[in-house]
């Protein structure tokens, strides 16, 4: 009788073990589902967008000194103010009607909308907008770009460096972008760099 009881207990234990083996998911499957395919999927989707954006941004011209660009309307290169972003310490004042800076060979990988940036100094006491226009590939855009003095109360040109942007539509390949001063009552601006980015959320300067 003792042997029979032991046999019954052993059979019950074996039966429970078999049932557990059949009803529990394998650890490898649970790991693959929890941190393998799902984890890899979320990691991939999180990294695709930034890398694609970074790739597109890398294909665009970065912040570029205006001192080497084509100037019009008697605009000249100067260096009598500090604090700018240009690598050569130079800038171009746009202070009279007709003065312009033309950025040639602005190459982009695909046609579409991009963000055109201007790094400039404006220490005019008024915060009213100066009438600056943009011309893309020989055609003036319908919108202007606001290059007013955003730093309230500042009249020091060495500390008046700011940035502003506007959307432009470019062709795939090489483009030309011109920034022009239409004239007005304010003192104009000093421009030291122009830049292009994929969107306004990635400014080229701090």
Image: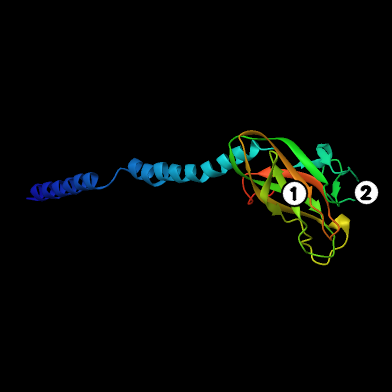
Residue 204 visible in the current orientation? no
Rendered residue at 44%/43% (across/down): 41
From the viewer's perspective, tell me whether residue 149 is left or right of residue 199: right
Q: Position of residue 122 (x, y in %)?
A: 82, 57
Task: Please state which of residues 26 and 188 is positioned toward the viewer in this rendering.
Answer: 188
Rendered residue at 35%/40% (across/down): 28
From the viewer's perspective, tell me whether residue 176 is left or right of residue 192: left
Rendered residue at 26%/47% (across/down): 24
Q: What whole-number distance in Å separates the C-alpha atoms at marks 2 and 1? A: 19 Å
* Residue holding disc 2: 80
Q: Secondary structure at mark 2?
A: loop
Residue 182, label in figure: none
Q: Secondary structure at mark 1?
A: strand
Q: Earlier in the sequence, mark 2 or mark 1?
A: 2
Task: Please state which of residues 201 and 177 is positioned toward the viewer in this rendering.
Answer: 177
Q: Position of residue 126 (x, y in %)?
A: 82, 65
* Residue holding disc 1: 118
Residue 16 visible in the current orientation? yes
Task: Please state which of residues 127 and 50 is positioned toward the viewer in this rendering.
Answer: 127
Q: Residues within 10 Å of mark 1 (few under 14, many from 20)?
A: many
Color encoding of the figure: rainbow
């Amino acid at each position: 009788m003792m042997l029979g009881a032991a046999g019954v207990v052993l059979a019950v234990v074996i039966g429970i073990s078999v049932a557990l083996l059949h009803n529990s998911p394998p650890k490898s499957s649970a790991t693959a589902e929890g941190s393998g395919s799902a984890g890899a999927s979320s990691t991939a989707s999180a990294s695709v967008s930034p890398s694609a954006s970074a790739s597109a941004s890398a294909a665009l011209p970065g912040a570029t000194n205006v001192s080497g660009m084509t100037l019009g309307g008697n605009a000249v290169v100067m260096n009598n103010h500090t604090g700018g972003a240009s690598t050569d310490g130079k800038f171009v004042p746009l202070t009279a009607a007709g003065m312009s800076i033309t950025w040639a060979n602005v190459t982009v990988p695909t046609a579409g909308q991009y963000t055109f940036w201007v790094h400039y100094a404006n220490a005019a006491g008024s915060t009213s907008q100066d009438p600056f226009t943009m011309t893309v590939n020989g055609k003036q855009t319908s919108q202007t770009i606001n290059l007013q003095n955003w730093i309230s109360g500042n009249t020091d040109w060495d500390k008046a460096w700011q940035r502003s942007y506007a959307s432009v539509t470019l062709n795939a390949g090489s483009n030309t972008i011109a920034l022009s001063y239409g004239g007005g009552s304010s003192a104009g601006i000093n421009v030291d760099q122009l830049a292009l980015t994929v969107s306004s959320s990635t400014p080229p300067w701090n």
